[in-house]
Image (cartoon, coloured by chain):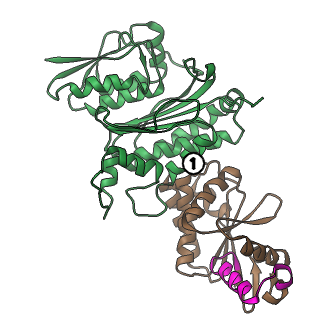
Chain colours: A brown, B green
Amino acid sequence: MIQHMDVGAVVLRNLCGLYSNLVTRPTGKAVRHAIEERLADRPAPSLTIIDFSEVGLLDFSCADEVVGKLLLHYVDVRAEAYFLVRGADDHHLEAIEQVLERYGLALVVIDANGGARIVGPVDDDSRRAWHEVQTRGRAAPDELLHQVGGPREKLVAQLDSLSTRRLLLRADDEYVALHTMM
Amino acid sequence: MSTVITVPPSLDDNTFEQVLEQFTHASDHEKLLIDARHTRWASPYGLTALLALGHARAEDPAGFTGPEAEDTASYWQRAGFYRYAEELFELHGTIPRARPGASDSNVLLEITPVEKSDDVHAVVERIQTKSQNILVHELNLDPQATMRFAMTLSEVCQNIVEHAGARGWVAVQTYRWRQRLLGRRVVVIAVCDAGIGFRKSLETAQGRRLSDRWDDAMALEDAVIRGVSRFRDPGRGQGLAGVRRYVGKWDGKLSVRSGTARIAIVPSWDDDVPLTENLPSFPGAQVQITIPERVEAR
C-alpha cells in the first residue's frame, strides 16, 4: 500500500518552530531524523513529499543533511521509499541541486504550477524516458519505444535505473510516475 | 617589559598584516599593548581580527588603547567592538559610551560572536531583515541575492562552529570603496577566529596522508579550492564550494587566511595574488568576502 505523508506540513513545521530557516548541520540532522522516524513504521512502498513552502532559507549544509543523506540512505538500502520535493524556490533548489550532484543522486521536484521535473545528474536519454512515463502516468517499455526510440534493451535498462534511483516506481512490467501516487 | 603594537591609521585585511608582524615578534612573556590611538578607519575584517588577536592572548590579556578620534571611537562602539573587547583586553583610555538605540545604517550586522549552531541561526535571522534593501536597491543585485547572501554568511559562520574549536566573530558592513572599483559600493563580510585553523583541522582527519609539502597553503588549497574536509563524509566541504560559486556569480572576492598563508579567489577588478605564503603566523582562520555593486553593462 502506498502511503502519502506530507513531511512539509508535519515534520518541518513542528521541528522548525524555533527557526523558520533550515540552516546548520545539527538542524538538518534533526529534521532528517524526524522524517526517518515517521517513515520507519510505514509499509512499503511509501511516497514522502518534502514540502519547503514553509522554509525560509536552506543552506548547503542543511540541504546535505535533509535531502542528500536522506535519499542516500534509502537508495543504499534499496528501500521502497520514494520522495518528491515541492514548494521549493530557486535558492532552495540551488542548494538541493549541489547536494544531489555531489552524491550522484536525483529527485523529482513539483513546481508551483504542478509540473514535475528531475533535479540532479541524469543523462538526456533517461530524462526523455522519464518524461514519457511522467506524461502518461504509467507505461510499459513497449508503449514508450515509439517516442523514445532506441533498442528496447537500452530503454528497459534506463527505466530500471530510474526505478532504482527512486525516480519511477516499477509495478510488474510497468513503470509508474511518482505523482500518480499522490 | 612591554611591547607596543601600533595599529595603522587604516585597518583592513592588508594592513592587519602589519599588526601581526609586530605580534609575532613579541615574546609570549612580554606584556602587549595594542595602540589604536591613531587609527581613523577600520573594516569589519580589521575589527573582528583585532578581537581574534585578543582571543589568541586570552591567558595574558593585552592592553588596548582605542582610537582618539571621536567619530572613529564612536563608530567602533556602534559596530559592537567594545562589547567584546572588554572581555579580551585590558582597556585603557576613554571608552566611548554606548548610546541606547544608536545604530549605523552601514552596519548590516554588528560584530557578533559565533561559537555554536544557535549563533548561526541568530546571524541569519538578523541579516535577512537588514540586507534586503541594501543588496537589491543599493548594490543592484537580483532579489534572490538576499537569500544567497544569507546562505553565504551561514556557511562561513558554520566554519567556526565545525572547525575552529573556539569562538569567532562575524561582522557585515557596506561602504563606498574609494580606492578601487571607481567608488562603487561594496558589502563586506568578515569572519575571524583564533581557533585551530585549516591545517590542524585537516590533520585531524582519520587516515589522512600528509604529503611532504603539507603546510598552511596546501591546507587552504585543499579546503577552499578542492572542498576537502576533515570529515570523511562525502557530503562535507560543500559549504565553501557553494560560497565560492555565489561569490563568483557576484563578481566578488573571497579571501581566507589561516596560519601563515592566505588564499584568494580574485575577481578582475582586484590585483591581489591567489596565494600568499610566509605571512606572520596567526592562529585560526580569517575570512573576508567582498561583493561589489553591480553595474549594468552599457
Residue A182 visible from this viewpoint:
no
The furthest residue to the bottom? A172
Q: Is residue A39 above or below residue B196?
A: below
Query: Residue B251's x, y, as percent?
Result: 61, 37
Type of residue at label 1? Tyr
Residue A121 visible from this viewpoint:
yes
The quarter of the picture where the C terminus of chain B appears is top right
Give the magenta-colored segment's residue range.
Answer: A145-168
Would you say B211 lies left or right of A92 here? left
Looking at the picture, tell me which residue is in the foreground, A17 or B151. B151
Q: Is residue A49 magenta?
A: no
Looking at the picture, tell me which residue is in the foreground, B192 or A158. A158
Query: Residue A52's x, y, as percent?
Result: 67, 57
Q: Is residue A157 magenta?
A: yes
User: SS at mark 1?
Assistant: loop
Query: Residue A10's x, y, as percent?
Result: 64, 63
Looking at the picture, tell me which residue is in the foreground, B38 or A89. B38
Q: Chain of mark 1?
A: A
Residue denoted by label 1: A19
Looking at the picture, tell me which residue is in the foreground, A2 or A61. A61
